[in-house]
């Protein structure tokens, strides 16, 4: 089931407000984030019943999709550890927002960059 437009708009709006905030491993906002903590913060504050989890914990929970829409999730694998290891929120047109690293903090990225394509796992959607 696709989320409605107001849910998507709330997710995207809150995610974009976090641009530039620092990356801190294990953090889940509101002042700093790691990648899964960023997802938890944005979705929890938009009415989703999810618990704080790791990327590897979120991957089996989501509905796998092939045609991502804004507000869906982007998953990468084998980035710093084997298996599902990084995630962000799809914005549309190949762009996503994520808590990238200690060097970048929360930034926009391109799903189709060579690095992201090498590590691409799939797209997912939370059930509300």
Image: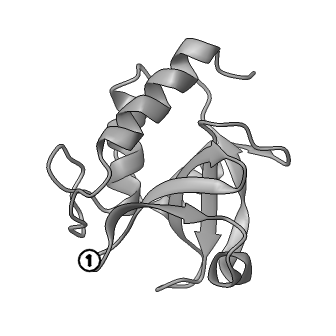
Q: Is residue 40 left or right of residue 94?
A: left
Q: Is residue 87 visible?
A: yes
Q: Nearer the viewer, residue 113 or 124?
A: 113
Query: Residue at image x 28%, y 80%?
Result: 103
Query: Residue at image x 35%, y 50%?
Result: 38
Please identify the quarter of the rendering in which residue 63 is found. Answer: top right
Q: x and y percent of residue 24 in the render?
A: 20, 68
Q: x and y percent of residue 50 in the render?
A: 43, 34
Residue extending farthest left: 31
User: Which quadrant holds the C terminus?
Assistant: top right
**Compared with residue 114, is residue 77 higher up or lower down, i.e. above or below?**
above
Residue located beneath label 1 in the image? 102
Query: Residue at image x 40%, y 56%?
Result: 36
Q: Is residue 51 visible?
A: no
Q: x and y percent of residue 105 in the render?
A: 29, 66
Q: Label 1 neighbourhood size at 10 Å, few (<14), some (14-19), many (20+)?
A: few
Q: Nearer the viewer, residue 39 or 54?
A: 39
Q: How many marks?
A: 1
Q: Is residue 108 left or right of residue 16?
A: right
**Compared with residue 121, is residue 124 higher up or lower down, i.e. above or below?**
above
């Amino acid at each position: 089931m696709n989320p409605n437009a107001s849910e998507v708009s709330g997710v995207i709006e809150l995610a974009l407000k976090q641009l530039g905030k620092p990356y801190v491993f294990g953090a889940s906002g509101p002042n700093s984030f790691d990648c899964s903590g960023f997802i938890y913060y944005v979705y929890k504050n938009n009415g989703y019943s999810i618990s704080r989890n790791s990327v590897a914990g979120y991957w089996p929970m989501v509905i796998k999709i092939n045609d991502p829409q804004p507000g869906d999730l982007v998953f990468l694998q084998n980035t710093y550890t084997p298996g599902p290891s990084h995630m962000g929120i799809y914005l549309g047109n190949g762009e996503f927002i994520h808590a990238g690293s200690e060097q970048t903090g929360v930034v926009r990225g391109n799903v189709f960059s060579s690095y992201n394509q090498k590590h691409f796992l799939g797209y997912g959607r939370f059930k509300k």
